[in-house]
Image: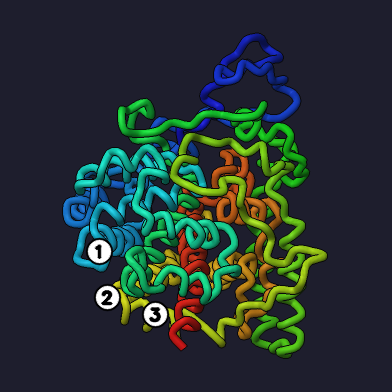
């Protein structure tokens, strides 16, 4: 991802490594250095994993020809092709948003994608859409930064920022400001198109970083951007988890390999036990509410490393955003006025969001709904080496944990299952990929579900991406509904 990474490290002696990016000397025995990244589409996944046979390759190539907006098989598509059914749904939706008739002009769509990706400094997506922006007639002057773009687009800055990091703060007043009368106003249809694009690209940044997507090309390309580091922080700290005080990620590698098989068996046993308990006795509504509040508060303790707000790796992607220091803060922060939980039965995607978005931006609701359902229901009935396994409980725990971190509660879900099914290292990974994806590391990816296949971990990333997108949309669409009523 155009970030300094383990591949920038070279041996200087048997005990030390030197980072070729910042020239910092790193002791080998301080932390375990992550293995060399793959030279394929992902830095986390060996290239051989993508040799899937003629049928899958033919299907992927057909989908690229039919739906790809860039006209080429990019690295995101290659990683998603581990799940061809989902890939088709994703590409169809993406194509509709970017290329089919819709409220927004084509160059606006790509610039909004750039603005969204920039919230997470996702250079991969920015470079991709810089090219597309120019190809659809966008002015190269706009690529100099926000001060060169029309006021209408600038007005999206606030909702872009809130959607990306704290969507629960979006109110009907934000919507009213954007659609008020005047030369720079947005129609509701245009605004819904923009909101869908923002949510899609925030979530896609999570997938890019969580899957270790490698860059497509030389980051020094004329119109593209490449990361620069600031402060005294280098991404070799991230790649090696130096200065990250998280004991759940620092156990001995040999012990991890020995334990991973029993860890899998223990997870299978917990799933079986939970299913039996559910069949025997349902928890009361009061108990379910208590368990949600407990899980929400416990998510505060799941930290993504000892980071300070001002030492995050930063690229010149910041030209496309305002207030770069604004980031995710826990929904359930201690010592603050209690924010109301978003109760799914009061405003859900199925009963409310779907119809609103479909009414204002024709057919996109059907495409998004298909994508959400596809990833949520996707299963091969396997878990690592085990076959004929019902993974519904696990998929639901992953999806609902993301929504829990965004303050969204399902009354019919027992949040006690989250603690039973998601180990701490997986929770750290989920929170990082969902809330601060630019901090995701190979070590975090390798650190959970060590017996699972890479395709299963990609499925996790797809679930996290879609859960995040749906959470953002729910908050934005609820605010639009309140504006309308």
Q: Secondary structure at mark 3?
A: helix
Q: Is 396 in front, or is 479? A: 479
The first of marks 2 and 3 along the sequence is: 3
The local crowd at label 1, few if under 14, some if 14 to 19, many if 20 or more residues have their Cα within 10 Å, is: some
| Foreground residue among 277 and 282 | 282
Q: Which residue is mark 2?
A: 363
Q: Secondary structure at mark 1?
A: helix
Residue at 36% across, 67% down: 185
| Rendered view: 370 above or below 150 | below
Neighbour class for label 2 at 10 Å: few (<14), some, many (≥20)? some
Compare marks 3 and 1 and give the one earlier in the sequence.
1
Left or right side of 236 for 211: left
Secondary structure beneath dot 2 equals loop
Numbered circles on residues, count: 3
The residue that mark 3 highlights is 354
Position above or below: 132 against 90: above
């Amino acid at each position: 991802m155009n970030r300094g990474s383990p591949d920038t490290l070279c041996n200087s002696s048997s005990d030390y490594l030197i980072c070729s990016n910042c020239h910092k000397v790193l002791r080998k025995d301080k932390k375990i250095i992550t293995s060399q990244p793959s030279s394929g589409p992902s830095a986390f996944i060996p290239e051989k994993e993508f040799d899937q046979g003629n049928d899958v390759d033919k299907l992927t190539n057909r989908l690229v020809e039919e739906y790809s907006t860039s006209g080429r098989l990019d690295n995101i598509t290659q990683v998603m092709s581990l799940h061809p059914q989902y890939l088709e749904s994703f590409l169809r939706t993406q194509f509709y948003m970017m290329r089919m008739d819709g409220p927004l002009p084509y160059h606006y769509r790509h610039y909004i994608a750039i603005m969204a990706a920039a919230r997470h400094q996702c250079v991969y997506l920015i470079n991709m859409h810089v090219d597309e922006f120019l190809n659809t007639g966008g002015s190269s002057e706009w690529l100099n930064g926000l001060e060169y773009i029309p006021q209408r687009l600038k007005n999206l800055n606030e909702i872009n920022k809130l959607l990306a990091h704290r969507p629960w703060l979006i109110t009907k007043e934000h919507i009213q400001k954007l659609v008020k009368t005047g030369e720079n106003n947005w129609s509701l249809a245009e605004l819904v198109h923009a909101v869908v694009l923002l949510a899609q690209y925030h979530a896609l940044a999570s997938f890019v970083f969580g899957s270790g997507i490698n860059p497509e090309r030389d980051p020094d390309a004329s119109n593209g951007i490449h990361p620069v580091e600031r402060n005294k922080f280098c991404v070799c700290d991230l790649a090696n988890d130096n200065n990250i005080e998280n004991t759940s990620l620092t156990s001995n590698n040999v012990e991890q390999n020995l334990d991973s098989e029993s860890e899998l068996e223990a997870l299978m046993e917990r799933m079986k036990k939970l299913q039996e308990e559910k069949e025997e006795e349902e928890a009361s509504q009061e108990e379910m509410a208590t368990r949600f509040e407990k899980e929400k508060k416990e998510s505060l303790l799941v930290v993504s490393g000892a980071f300070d707000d001002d030492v995050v790796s930063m690229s010149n992607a910041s030209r496309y955003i305002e207030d770069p220091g604004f980031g995710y803060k826990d929904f359930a922060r201690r010592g603050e006025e209690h924010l109301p939980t978003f109760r799914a039965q009061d405003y859900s995607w199925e009963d409310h969001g779907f119809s609103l978005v479909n009414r204002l931006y024709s057919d996109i609701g059907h495409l998004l709904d298909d994508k959400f359902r596809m990833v949520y229901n996707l299963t091969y009935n396997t878990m690592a080496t085990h076959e004929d396994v019902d993974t519904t409980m696990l998929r639901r725990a992953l999806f609902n944990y993301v929504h829990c971190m965004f303050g969204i509660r399902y009354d019919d879900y027992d949040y006690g299952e989250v603690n039973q099914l998601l180990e701490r290292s997986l929770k750290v990974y989920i929170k990082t990929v969902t809330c601060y994806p630019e901090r995701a590391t190979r070590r975090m990816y390798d650190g959970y579900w060590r017996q699972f296949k890479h395709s299963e971990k990609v499925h996790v990333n797809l679930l996290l991406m879609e859960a995040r997108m749906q959470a953002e949309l729910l908050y934005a669409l609820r605010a639009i509904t309140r504006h309308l009523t």
